[in-house]
Image: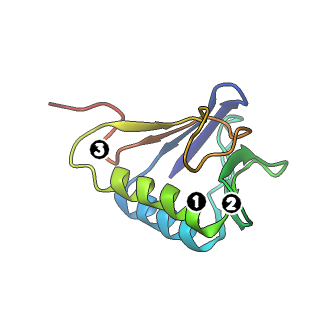
Amino acid sequence: MKLDYYSAAEGGDITSGRADLCHLTDLVASGGELTLAPSAHPRHLRGVLIEVTQGPVTIGVNDRSYLGIRGGAENRSLLADLLRNVASMDDGGHVHMEYFEGHHFLAPDSVPLIVNSPHGGMPQR
């Protein structure tokens, strides 16, 4: 799994194989932490930290260079469903997660996030 972070305005990008994306899906649903192999690239994040709280999902980057995802169980479940759908894609593609007024599970202070299909970010058809 590769996690890139650009800025608060540009957000982040997840590129992963199916198994790792499914593992992330389970982690989002239950809470916990995933540490990735160290990288010298300044844009690569060190892991993912899922915090069980209340309310909508907030996505950001913490001071440890981890992608932080926090929110209530119901809202994290909606995010997990979206990640599961991306993991099951049969072709390339990606999903943009970005807050907009009235978003059904993201908090207004979430950074944008792109999640790529295990087959790449663009369809091959």
Q: What is the distance, in whole Å, between disc 3 and disc 1 at their CAs?
A: 27 Å
Q: Which mark is residue 75?
A: 1
Q: Which residue is mark 2?
A: 71
In percent of width and height, residue 1 lies at 50, 52
Q: Is residue 106 above or below residue 17?
A: above
Q: Is residue 41 above or below residue 76?
A: above
In percent of width and height, residue 124 lies at 20, 31
| Category of crowding for the residue at label 3, using alpha-carbon neighbours closer than 10 angstroms: few (below 14), some (14–19), many (at least 20) | many
In percent of width and height, residue 49 lies at 70, 61
| Category of crowding for the residue at label 2, using alpha-carbon neighbours closer than 10 angstroms: few (below 14), some (14–19), many (at least 20) | many
Q: Is residue 24 above or below residue 40?
A: below
Helix, strand or loop for disc 3: loop
Q: Amino acid at mark 1?
A: Asn
Q: Amino acid at mark 3?
A: His
Upstream in sequence: badge 3 or badge 1 = 1
The residue located at (38%, 59%) in the rendering is 84
